[in-house]
Amino acid sequence: MDLIWILIVGGLIGWLSGNLIGRDVPGGLLGNIVAGFIGSWLGTELLGPRGPVVGGFYILPAIVGSIIALLVFFALARGGAFRRR
């Protein structure tokens, strides 16, 4: 049951971060979950463990980290790093 809870919260964090920056996360549900996981790790590394914990995620650092990760991803994708040649 813990794994399901972690996947749901990770997906919600990725979805919320995508909405806050006004872009859709590529990959749909799986992309949102990955963005939530990466954001949680990045935010906790940058800001430390702060705020409420839901499903094993520190919510505020996870959202901030997910926004940073998505902005970096979109900047790289726009610059041609992920385009086929």
Image (tube, grey):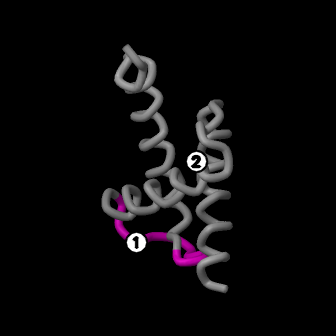
The residue that disc 2 covers is 31
Q: Where residue 45 appears, x then y in whole percent? A: 31, 62
Mark 1 vs mark 2: which is more N-terminal?
A: 2
Q: Is residue 61 visible?
A: no
Q: Judge depth for marks 1 and 2 and give the one in front.
A: 2
> At x 61% / y 52%, what residue is drawn?
30
Is the residue marked by circle 1 packed among few (<14), some (14-19), or many (20+) residues within 10 Å? Answer: some
- The mark found on residue 37 in the picture is none
Q: Which residues are magenta?
A: 47-56
**As drawn, is 25 to the left or to the right of 37?**
right
| Amino acid at dot 1 | Pro
Inter-mark Cα distance, 1 to 2: 24 Å
The residue that disc 1 covers is 49
Q: Where residue 77 appears, x then y in whole percent? A: 43, 25
Point out the image quarter for the C terminus: top left
User: Which residue is more in the foreground, 22 or 52?
Assistant: 22
Q: Where residue 22 appears, x then y in whole percent? A: 65, 31
User: Which residue is more in the foreground, 32 or 67?
Assistant: 32
> At x 58% / y 47%, what residue is drawn?
31
